[in-house]
Image (cartoon, rainbow, N blue to C red):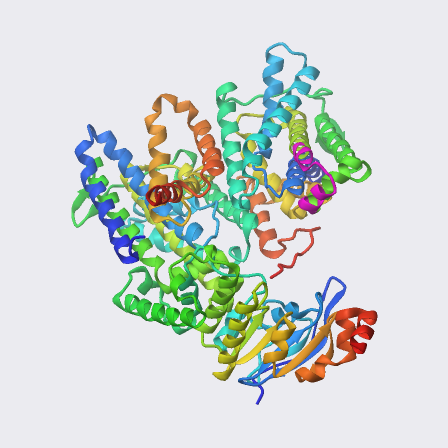
Amino acid sequence: MPEFVQFLISGLTVGAVYALVALGFTLVYNASDVVNFAQGEFVMLGGMVTVFATAAGVPLPLAAVLAVCVSVIVGLLLYWLAIEPARDASPVTLIIITIGASILLRGAAQILFDKQFHKLPSISGDTPIHLLGATVQPQSFWVLGGTAVIVLLLYVFLERTVLGKAVLATAANRLAARLVGINTATVMALAFGGSAAIGAIAGILITPITLTSYDVGTMLALKGFAAAMLGGMGNPLGAVAGGLLLGLLEAFGVGYISSTYKDAFAFIVILLVLFAMPQGLFGRRTVERV
Amino acid sequence: MLQKIGHRYLILIVLAVIVAVLPLIFPSSYYFRVASLVWVSALAAIGLNVLMGSAGQVSLGHAGFFGIGAYAVAIGPAHFGIPPWAALLLGCFISSVLAYLVGRPILKLKGHYLAIATLGLGVLVALVITTESRWTGGPDGMPVAKLVLFGWRVSGSDTWYWVSGGLLIIGTWIALNLNDTPTGRAFRALHDSEVAARVAGIDVARFKLQAFVIAAAYASVAGSVLALMNGFINPDQAGFLHSVEMVTMVVLGGLGSVVGSIVGAAVLITLPQVLTVFQEYEHLLLGFIIIVSMIFMRDGIVPTLSRVLAKRTKA
Amino acid sequence: MTILAAKDIGISFGGVKAIDGVSFAVSPGQILSIIGPNGAGKTTLFNIVSGVYERDQGQVELSGEDVTGLTPDKLATRGMSRTFQNLQIFQRMTAAENVMVGRHLRERCNLLADLFRLPSVTRQNAQTRDAALTFLNDVGLRTSADVAAGSLSYGACKRLEIARALASEPRVLLLDEPAAGCNAVETEEIEELIRRVAAKGIAVVLVEHDMKLVMKISDHILVLNRGKPIADGKPHEVRDNPAVLEAYLGKHGAREAARA
């Protein structure tokens, strides 16, 4: 039983990060139909910038804010310099562009920072909490709590504010949105900036537990994408559910099946979902019009 | 517009001439090695182009098949005592069978779903290779026995230059053949409009699968040759980054253009070599090339150049 | 001697019944037109009959064989072909290649032979190309044979699709708005073409908005409105049918038309 709870907590914690990455994907996908592979790099930037800023003497809270800002700027630049110029390209071309961007960001991080692993201090210390027989790090609660707050804020924003509705409208039909006066360029910028902020926060929260380095972005992007697919591409709540579920699957897989193939679980999940249920758990089936 | 038939042989002749003549300007064996790398990469790219350019199906996991071919010629002789040339054929067979089995369900997907599914497949292959270190030597890789053909030990960068160059010419010939045939037309038709291709009687699933298997076979052979050439192989050859490089070569050169794939491979391989000073900047450069070429030269080098030349000759 | 029969076809899209209880039958050499206001379900019906959509109820029979639910490529082997309302030509292939694809079922297609371009393949290519050129000639596109299909005019593309559909030598041809966007001259050419096709013994089912064309060439007309059949008969019967007038013109317009 204590084992089970252990896996549950660690699964949910890591799942929360996947959920946030997936949420970032979904936000951008909804606004622009683009699958942004560089999403994982925002998480990397959140962690790495904070680490190097604190090493340079900046107090931790300020460093974290700086990291989020850097990430948002990178997200906006990504949109303006790489996505917008290619806006009428095919979906595959756009994926390739974002893959190129993620490689570029990784290459830049490699040079600007270094190739080591880095850690951040936990927000409320490292004394483990004992819960139902399992040992839980306090940082886990920060991760889960932070994720819940972000999801809630995003929900309120999208459903209850005018700007949020504009984002949803753009997602549903970009041309129609423009025709009713919505500034789609603003919406896109918001989506990219927002997803970058979400990713950065996820990175800052998780680094005390899983460490960070210049190349954590790729795996996170792939797993985050698996989570988004699992929940149904384009569905924000689905993305969160998918992320948590994926984290749990990974944790239980590692605990009960095999720890050497830890990373494989996410990909097996992707393939199974795509084969059996391409619309995901909460997505809608579409019919192609001829 | 050149006559279709003449066009095909012209390309092959020019390619053969380039392969034959290039060594005359090589100052050292290092250049032979780089050129061989280009030939091998181009071979894989041509195969991928059949799938992506002709049949229009994206594959972001193709390095997986490359890796299978590479590790087949490493594991076969080392663990099973199979001669390398047999291991090459076996690797090609395994890749083709895997492509056939996995292709059926995967190719039902489209667009970015297909992209991610193939990506997942490639990553899984790379993971298995990295993890099963007893067979594969794990993340550090393993050595590859030399190829022995009829008692002749194939070694030396110049020898491999001719071998890989020759294979490239054969591979190019086959890919060019395909274009103006029922199969080639079926590929291009289902690329442009699946429903219309169906209405014309084309079993779309069957042809997509054929394209997938062909591409897998090409990648596998290329991987085997690279492994034999280098005498060493590591899991990066099957990794996601390599898959992305392969796709970039095809797209950069021009989707659908066989010559384009060769050009794309040449550019992507030689550019970092030219800028070896910037070893650290390899990723940065690759990412940059991808982004810029996709934005400004969306059709790829060869089609864009042909268009420019066509306009010039008209004016 | 019916060659194509649709029986009681029905399909819903998310709660909206797009087609509700539609049936028709066509014999070789006959021209059946399906007409109705926009949204009546004409193209949806086509898509069901040609295997692009899966119906919720009903059957489709081709030469007496139940072919319900078969995919378009299987229907093609049984002699059915069609064109599309929103063009589905192969943009990046030449006009000739488009029609050559239409000949696919008349070709032997062997992967290994094609990979190595055996002499038999080269010979067959020449035959296929000749056949394609003949079909292009029939629709007046012979001179555009080696032009990229994507650069042809709209009317030319429509005719190209017809040539491609005819290339498989079908026994049943479904034409979805063949005269859409055509001027008077082009429409007359289409009319001639359809007559020639029917004269060869091919059953033609037509979806059209051009009433003059429909009235002139149809042997039989089926009128749909909101997915339901509202009239079914010879052109002159349908033309004066009050229900048809009402569907197109509304109650007020129908009254006006009755007085005209």
Q: Main secondary structure of the magenta part?
A: helix
Residue B111 vs C226, above or below: the answer is above
Can you name the residue that lies furthest to the bottom here?
Answer: C1
Total marks shown come to: 0
Pick whichever, B283 or C76, lies toward us.
Answer: C76
Residue B201 seen in the figure: no
Residue B225 seen in the figure: yes
Pick whichever, C115 or B314, lies toward us.
Answer: B314
Determine whether, in the image, residue A64 is placed left or right of residue B166.
right
Q: Quadrant of the C terminus of chain C?
A: bottom right
Instruction: Confirm whether the magenta stretch covers residue B104.
Output: no
Residue A270 vs A75, above or below: the answer is below
Instruction: Confirm whether the magenta stretch covers residue A187.
Output: yes
Q: Quadrant of the N terminus of chain C?
A: bottom right
Determine whether, in the image, residue C204 is placed left or right of residue C143.
right
Residue B140 in the image, given as x and y percentages of width and height: 40, 33
Chain part drawn in magenta: A173-189
Q: Residue at x 49, y 77 (%)?
A: C79
Pick whichever, A16 or B310, lies toward us.
Answer: B310
Pick whichever, B198 or C135, lies toward us.
Answer: C135
Residue B243 vs A101, above or below: the answer is below
Residue A284 vs C189, above or below: the answer is above
Residue B22 in the image, given as x and y percentages of width and height: 21, 37
Determine whether, in the image, residue B212 is placed left or right of residue C154.
left
Q: Residue at x 33, y 28 (%)?
A: B273
Q: Residue at x 61, y 15 (%)?
A: A53
Residue C197 in the image, given as x and y percentages of width and height: 49, 79
Residue A213 in the image, given as x and y percentages of width and height: 55, 25
Can you name the residue that lies furthest to the front here?
Answer: C260
The part of the image, by quadrant, that contains residue C246 is: bottom right
